[in-house]
Image (spheres, coloured by chain):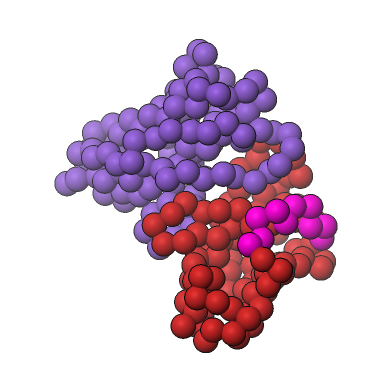
Chain colours: A purple, B red
Amino acid sequence: DAKTTQPPSMDCAEGRAANLPCNHSTISGNEYVYWYRQIHSQGPQYIIHGLKNNETNEMASLIITEDRKSSTLILPHATLRDTAVYYCIVRSIQGAQKLVFGQGTRLTINP
Amino acid sequence: GAGVSQSPRYKVAKRGQDVALRCDPISGHVSLFWYQQALGQGPEFLTYFQNEAQLDKSGLPSDRFFAERPEGSVSTLKIQRTQQEDSAVYLCASSLYRTGSGAQYFGPGTRLLVL
């Protein structure tokens, strides 16, 4: 599976949009981009995933560039409860089903 | 509906003791995963089941680690002769399908401390 690169930390003001970037320049055609987050002392929580089209659900939006080499997770109106480590993961839908976590981005929402 | 549950939530073991960690996946989920998370690190894959079949155990760090899912539902991760380096959070996740793009849903984890 392709590797991902994320900034180690970010800050965002409560109520503003949080935009979390991820680079995955070696992504291949059958690999999806997944986002999970982990709030302190909890298990990772699935947020969203996509292949090449932009995706939106009740939690977030995922914007994938046309060349698929990078993506951005958008939390439209961040709250204090969104403070967590956010992981961007690239995984093929074929072959190994495991998730390979990197270091993620520690997002802090400030009041 | 009910999510993935794990028990115990916390376990303290003396070095050399055997421990057993339980995972109850979401009902009907075919795939089950175990991950290990050291302090300050992201989770690392241990092993994967599709129903009762253990299809990938490439992440198990040693032969002291053993996992089973005999009836394709509940799974147990057993660690024999625990060592201090086994101290970590052990996470279980389940997924509805065998393959494809489906999400994995994680339990709260079992925090193991080996003294």
Quick one: A22 or B30, which is closer to the camera?
A: A22
Magenta-drawn stretch contains A53: no
Q: Residue at x 54, y 71 (%)?
A: B86
Q: Position of residue B49 (x, y in %)?
A: 75, 56
Decide whether the magenta segment is chiefly helix, strand or loop: loop
Magenta-drawn stretch contains B56: yes
Q: Residue at x 67, y 66 (%)?
A: B62
- Residue B51 is left or right of residue B16, and the answer is right
Q: Quadrant of residue A93?
A: top right
When the figure is inspected, residue B72 is found, relative to residue A104, above or below; the finding is below
When the figure is inspected, residue A65 is found, relative to residue A73, above or below; the finding is above
Counting labels gives: 0
Quick one: B47 or A75, which is closer to the camera?
A: B47
Residue B9 appears in the picture as rendered: no
Report the residue that reaches farthest toward the top: A66
Q: Residue at x 33, y 41 (%)?
A: A8
- Residue A45 is left or right of residue A10, and the answer is right
When the figure is inspected, residue B90 is found, relative to residue A23, above or below; the finding is below
Q: Residue at x 51, y 45 (%)?
A: A101
Q: Position of residue B46 (x, y in %)?
A: 64, 57
When the figure is inspected, residue B18 is found, relative to residue B40, above or below; the finding is below
Residue A26 appears in the picture as rendered: yes
Q: Position of residue B51 (x, y in %)?
A: 80, 56
Q: Position of residue B5 (x, y in %)?
A: 58, 66
Q: Quadrant of the N terminus of chain A?
A: top right
Boundaries of the magenta span: B52-61
Q: Quadrant of residue A9?
A: top left
